[in-house]
Image: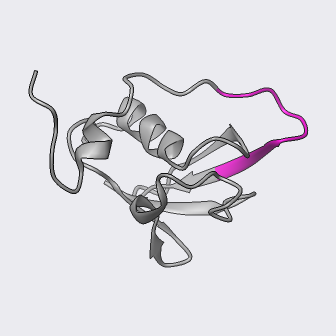
Amino acid sequence: AAQAAGPDAWYARLPAGEPPEPAAGPGTTRVQLRFPSGQRVVRRFALADRVAAVFQLLKATVPGAADAVPEVLFLGARLADRVDQTIEAAGLVNASLVVDV
């Protein structure tokens, strides 16, 4: 298979399926995802998980996000620009994210 290229190549390389959800405890946080429909999903992530895990979850669970990078905003900033940061480093502890798919 051809290797994905271009600015969204990282998205094509994300593993299929949802990332594992850690048990509650130290080193984890809850992140709320808000969708245009008004739906809200709360999911636990490890603080050491990369921001890419949020996109992996969306890719696996949101219709329309399988092939195209969804726009995810945190405090008005594009989260796609921070996929290599950890959840903690990106400031996503107990964060609420706006998802536009």
Residue 65 in view: no
In terms of depth relative to the viewer, which is nearer, 49 or 76?
A: 49
x and y percentages locating residue 97 in the rendered image:
55, 61
Would you say residue 92 sits in the magenta stretch? no
Give the prevailing secondary structure in the magenta stretch: loop
Q: Residue at x 41, y 64 (%)?
A: 81
Q: Residue at x 56, y 76 (%)?
A: 75
Relative horizontal placement of residue 86, taking residue 82 as reference (left or right): right
* Relative vertical location of residue 15 with respect to residue 85 in this rendering, above or below: above
Residue 62 in view: yes
Residue at the left extreme of this rendering: 2
* Relative vertical location of residue 14 with respect to residue 5 in this rendering, above or below: above
In terms of depth relative to the viewer, which is nearer, 98 or 77?
A: 77
Q: From which residue to which does the magenta span run?
A: 21-31
* Number of marks: 0
* Relative vertical location of residue 89 with respect to residue 20 in this rendering, above or below: below
Residue at the bottom extreme of this rendering: 76
* Relative vertical location of residue 38 with respect to residue 55 in this rendering, above or below: below
In terms of depth relative to the viewer, which is nearer, 73 or 11?
A: 11
Relative horizontal placement of residue 90, taking residue 15 as reference (left or right): right
x and y percentages locating residue 100 in the rendered image:
36, 60
x and y percentages locating residue 43 in the rendered image:
65, 40
